[in-house]
Amino acid sequence: MEEHGGKNQRRERKTTMKKLLVTGANGLLGKSLCRTAQKNKDYSVFGMYKDNKPTLQDLTFSCDICDKHLLDSAFRRISPDVVIHTAALTDVDKCELDKKSCWDVNAIGTKNVAEVCKAIDTHLVYISTDFVFDGEKDSRYKEDDKPHPINCYGASKFFGEKVVSSLERSSIIRTSGIFGKRSSRGKQNFPLWVLESIRKKEQISVIHDQFYCPTFVQNLSDMTLEIVDRKMFGIFHCSGKTKTSRYEFAKLVAGSYDLDESYIVPKSFSEISFVAKRPKNTGLSTEKIWTMLKTKPLELQKAVGLFMEEDLCD
């Protein structure tokens, strides 16, 4: 009888597991969220990607968020309790050069995700960006500051915010400069680029007067999943705690690995020609999440230390 009861209890626990679906599961954040959530026995994790299947143990499948019919079919088949929407085109210059693709994926794709989540009554967590702001504010941006994007990427993400915010159960997470050691569809994030360049003895020009809050991917994953677990709705700024320039960040990374910092050449924001306009200051205030979350945003020095300890793999 005891054994039979134990089996029933195990069966009951299995049926009450929350279904978590992560879009963009082959991206840096998507992979991290899937891996982190998978360690939580309360979750059954589904990873969705368009192409380049991720190397995950989760239940992964291919689906294009721009195809609403297929998206609706996939979501209804899984019936997720929570969707974390990370899928996006994030290359700011490429978004400016190909505005249609940028808008199709980041704006219309997010609208499709939001509409399907509304139809099946699912909690939607949307990963947004500090680039919804114009960078003209001297102090840090708070959650209730009015967005004013200055490039196509920022505008497409802000459109997504407006669509998602219309849902009764939604969370919008703005973040900044995500970094980690694992690859993201073959792309390098900033500290990996710095390390590779210096090791090749290549001089790099890095801006010293543009400011943001670099965010370690594992820290962001932990904050995001706490918001999911606690069913926290609204807008949250989940970034690193330290506001810095890319130049100072690059020097910190090089110094941490005992590499020659002389290869890092400071450049002014006005000296660099970008295809797309960039906001000069997108430091996010983390005061709200500091008081609300058990998981705290990391100081950059601590984050780089954890970055150094992270395994280098896909």
Image (spheres, grey):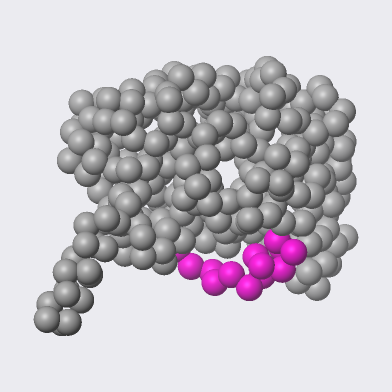
Q: Residue at x 48, y 67 (%)?
A: 313
Please name whichever residue, 235 or 211, is drawn nearer the observer in this view of the structure.
Answer: 235
Please name whichever residue, 23 or 89, is drawn nearer the observer in this view of the structure.
Answer: 23
Q: Residue 169: give x, y in percent of width and height.
A: 43, 31
Q: Residue 305: give x, y in percent of width and height.
A: 72, 68
Q: Residue at x 43, y 25 (%)?
A: 168
305 magenta-colored: yes
Magenta highlight: main SS: helix
Left or right of 127 in this view: 299: right
Q: Is residue 79 visible?
A: yes
Q: Residue 201 occupies which quadrant of the picture?
A: bottom right
In the picture, the quarter occupied by the C terminus is: bottom left
Q: Residue 194: give x, y in percent of width and height.
A: 71, 57
Please name whichever residue, 112 or 314, is drawn nearer the observer in this view of the structure.
Answer: 112
Magenta-tinted stretch? 302-314
Q: Residue 213: give x, y in percent of width and height.
A: 74, 44
Check the image and report above or below for 186 versus 302.
above
